[in-house]
Amino acid sequence: MVTSVSVIGLGKLGAPMAACFAARGFRVEAVDLNPKKVEAINCGVAPVREPGLEELIQGAGELLRASQITAEAVHGSEATFVVVSTPSEEGGGFSLQYVLPACEAIGRALAMKKTFHLVVLTSTVMPGSTAGPVMAALERASGRRCGQDFGLCYSPEFIALGTVIRDFYYPDFLLIGESDARSGEILADIYKNVCKNSPAIARMNFVNAEITKLAVNTYITTKISYANMLARLCEKLPEADVNVVTDALGLDTRIGPKYLKGAVSYGGPCFPRDNRALAALAARVGASSGLAEATDFFNRAQIKSLAEIVRSHYSGQDSIGILGLTYKPNTDVVEEAFGFLLAQELSSSNLPVIVYDPSAAAPVLGKCSTLRFARSAQECIEESGVVVLATPWQEFREVPTEHWVHKGQPRAIPRVIIDCWCSLDHLKSVDGVRYVRLGFGGAAERHVEATSNAR
């Protein structure tokens, strides 16, 4: 049984993975070229933002050690997990610019090992990569034969930032592409000893595993976009409610309730790029990719569509406030995040925008005279005539009701609250607030009517 592993790459997934292994009793050798991340791990500090990570690192004690030397980590472990970045290329595919140097370093270390060693590629790659350039780099650098002298598996994680630790311990299923049965069995056994549930394990060849990774995320993006299409439809029909519709849809076992929520565009580091990568793969081999392309097109169009909803409620007084710039709560990632893109869209039209996000790393939205950063959620709300809840951070749910109302003027022109996530429904009946929930019909029309009557 494997009792020691090494993890190459201490980023937003690698660092939590290393800590999770150590917390489950594995001896872990972690590696990163960035000395600050190495020092952080060795000092018991989280090198990346992730809830619960620092406590996990500190609890691991001597089982978790970090360095910048790949060879030492490989020599001191029985299996190596490669968790380095695979940036998107212009055509939609993924670059191996960090994977191949890591594999070459691992291969050089394998050349000096006499025992069988398993290499696990966790980074998302394009189909054909693992059996092609990745395996070739390992064999060339080691002078050894894959499947005979060392094993190779492709096993990407289906994990969301902000819930990495929970998702790693309680996966829905495990995906393993294997060079040989022995390697797949070793990895399956490792997972059985680290997971806290008993997930199904899908074992297959490399190319099927690579396609499956892209297919899972692309299917989810299609499901999200379908729910958002229904939300935009419901907004045009009086008394229509997308939540009622999707709750009923989710009862059908052929559909299921997960990710079936009409809200805003999907973002983050995985969904958009995996969707485009599948379309790029289809185009490369001459297959149809119309559905993936349509999903991506619809998702991008959501920013302008929702910006129009915001504009329809803006009276020209005060600013437009955006609460939340990250793609989800409990992370500092703003990559293709709805709030981030909405702020850019509105400020590019010279509308006054004020934004706030609880994450420590405030993104640079570019120089724009109409865009300001608030120091708190309260400041963002008080300076805005329209407030958009773009990311459902718990902090926003806890803002006292009185802070959502114009100070001292509860019956003046109401502050419009556009709730994208049904998180603020306690504001529905508050004087001085006009509560607008996405996916609910007739809101725009009632706003226009109420404004006309006020005049």
Image: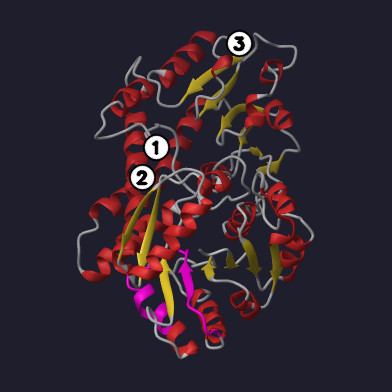
Please name the amino acid that badge 1 sits on: Tyr
Please name the amino acid that badge 2 sits on: Ile
Q: Secondary structure at mark 2?
A: helix
Q: Secondary structure at mark 3?
A: loop
Q: Give the class, few, some or many, for how many residues have Cα within 10 Å of label 3's Cα (few <14, many ≥20).
A: some
Mark 1 or 3 closer to N-term?
1
Q: Secondary structure at mark 1?
A: loop
User: Where does residue 430 sit, x and y in percent of width and height?
Assistant: 60, 10
Quadrant of the rendering where the C terminus is positioned: top right
Please report the residue visible at 63 percent of the width from the left and 64 percent of the height from the top.
28
Please report the residue visible at 59 percent of the width from the left and 56 percent of the height from the top.
21
Please name the amino acid that badge 3 sits on: Val
Residue on which disc 3 sits: 430
Pick whichever, 378 or 452, lies toward us: 378
Q: Give the class, few, some or many, for how many residues have Cα within 10 Å of label 1's Cα (few <14, many ≥20).
A: some
Pick whichever, 317 or 157, lies toward us: 157
In this view, the residue farthest toward the right is 43
> Over which residues does the magenta segment extend?
113-137
User: Where does residue 71 sit, x and y in percent of width and height?
Assistant: 62, 81
Residue on which disc 2 sits: 220
Tell me if residue 181 is in the magenta stretch.
no
**Side of 68 relative to 414 (left or right):** right
User: Where does residue 367 sit, x and y in percent of width and height?
Assistant: 66, 54
Quadrant in the picture for residue 395: top right
Mark 3 vs mark 2, foreground winner is: 2
Residue on which disc 1 sits: 259
Per the rendering, the mark at residue 375 is: none
**One can see residue 92 in this view:** no
Quadrant in the picture for residue 386: top right
From this view, report whether residue 367 is shown above or below residue 357: below
